[in-house]
């Protein structure tokens, strides 16, 4: 398939989901992550998101020399595999945070009851960004290995 676009398949995303959830779980339920998020500024949160993107891109396209982003299927100029990886990395942590009621547990204020303060939402987003660092490693590894 040299020179042609590689089709991104559902199986690729499934592999990412397994790896992403596997490594995200322990960090969603760790109080230290939620306390860390509480003390992070918006700037720290943005830098953390950038780190997730850098790790994901590096793991997919720099660590695997057989994979070339220019030969993959794209959405708006971005490789579909990379988009899927980012959705899985952040999405798996967000889903687990909600399912495990982490904001309610650590902040005594829920996200889904309509009464969540802006601070709880901001801290939850920062905690998701921290967890996504580990989730992206698991998701990219599973995608590359299988």
Image (cartoon, helix red, strand yellow):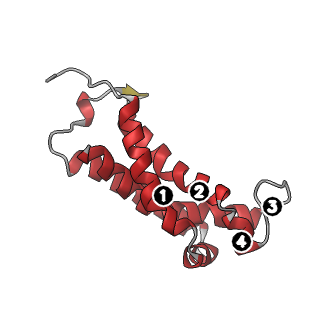
Query: Which one is nearer the viewer's eye here, 27 or 120?
Result: 27
Q: Gap in Å between the C-alphas at discs 4 and 2?
A: 13 Å
Upstream in sequence: badge 1 or badge 2: 1
Q: Which mark is residue 123?
A: none
Question: Helix or strand or loop: what does disc 1 sit on?
Answer: helix
Upstream in sequence: badge 4 or badge 2: 2
Left or right: residue 82 compared with residue 114: left
Give the x, y percent position of residue 127: 58, 66
Q: Which mark is residue 116?
A: 3
Q: Gap in Å between the C-alphas at discs 1 and 3?
A: 23 Å
Q: Nearer the viewer, mark 1 or mark 3?
A: 3
Give the x, y percent position of residue 99: 65, 56
In the figure, 69 relative to 101: above or below? above
Viewport quadrant of the N terminus: top left
Number of other residues with Cα within 10 Å of mark 2, as a class: few under 14, some 14 to 19, many 20 or more: some
Give the x, y percent position of residue 44: 53, 69
Q: Gap in Å between the C-alphas at discs 1 and 2?
A: 18 Å
| Residue wearing tag 4 | 105
Q: Gap in Å between the C-alphas at discs 4 and 1?
A: 24 Å
| Residue wearing tag 2 | 96
Q: Which mark is residue 49?
A: 1
In the figure, 92 relative to 104: above or below? above
């Amino acid at each position: 398939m040299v020179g042609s676009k590689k089709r991104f398949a559902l199986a690729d995303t499934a592999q990412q989901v397994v790896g992403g959830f596997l490594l995200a779980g322990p960090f969603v339920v760790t109080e230290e992550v939620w306390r860390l998020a509480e003390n992070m500024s918006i700037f720290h949160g943005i830098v953390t998101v950038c780190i997730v993107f850098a790790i994901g891109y590096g793991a997919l396209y720099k660590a695997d020399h057989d994979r070339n982003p220019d030969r993959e299927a794209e959405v708006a100029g971005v490789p579909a595999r990379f988009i899927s990886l980012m959705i899985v990395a952040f999405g798996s942590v967000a889903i687990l945070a909600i399912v495990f009621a982490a904001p309610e547990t650590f902040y005594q204020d829920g996200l889904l009851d309509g009464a969540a303060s802006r601070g709880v939402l901001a801290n939850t987003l920062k905690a998701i960004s921290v967890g996504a660092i580990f989730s992206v490693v698991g998701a990219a590894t599973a995608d590359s290995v299988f």
